[in-house]
Amino acid sequence: MARVWRVNSEGKVDIEKANEFSEVLMQSKFCDEADHLVATGGLMSQIYVWDCSTHNCKEVACFDHGIIDPEFKGLEIEWQNAKQVAVAGGSEFIYLWSIDSPS
């Protein structure tokens, strides 16, 4: 399960549930240039990008490697800028995805 927490204007901690996963969630990486975006992934073929500034942590993009690279299991996420995220996994390729065109 992915959860995002933030401190509200009254100083209380709000915890939002972003998604439940059937696989192990291994990493989450906030974007330095757009700190409301977080990319999550794990031992699965999908990498998700969430907008944590929305009330329910809206899913911005899902990068599913299963069709193009059946051996992919997410191991590392690295934001390149506010629009592009690089991911590496249990295969021989590193993928660069744009959140504006996730497929």
Image: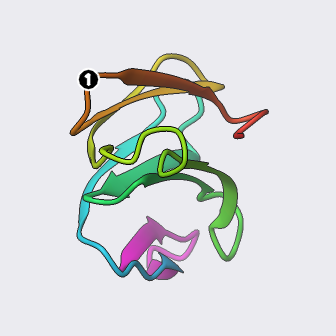
In the rendered image, which quarter is residue 22 located in? bottom left
Report the magenta stretch's main SS. strand
State the image coordinates of residue 71 (x, y, percent, origin top left). 30, 45
Q: Nearer the viewer, residue 36 or 77?
A: 77
Q: Give the residue drawn at x 39%, y 48%.
A: 70
Q: Nearer the viewer, residue 18 or 74?
A: 74
Q: Give the residue drawn at x 21%, y 39%.
A: 90
Whether the magenta-drawn stretch holds residue 102 is answered as: no
Q: In this view, does 10 lie above or below 82?
A: below
Which amino acid type corresponds to the residue marked 1 in the rendered image? Glu
Q: In this view, does 7 lie above or below 19?
A: above
Q: Give the residue drawn at x 69%, y 74%.
A: 55
Identify the residue position indicated by label 1 in the image: 92
The span shown in magenta is: 1-17
Q: Is mark 1 on a helix, strand or loop?
A: loop
Which quarter of the figure is the C terminus placed in?
top right
Whether the magenta-drawn stretch holds residue 3 is answered as: yes
State the image coordinates of residue 17 (x, y, percent, origin top left). 49, 81
Q: In this view, does 92 lie above or below 7?
A: above
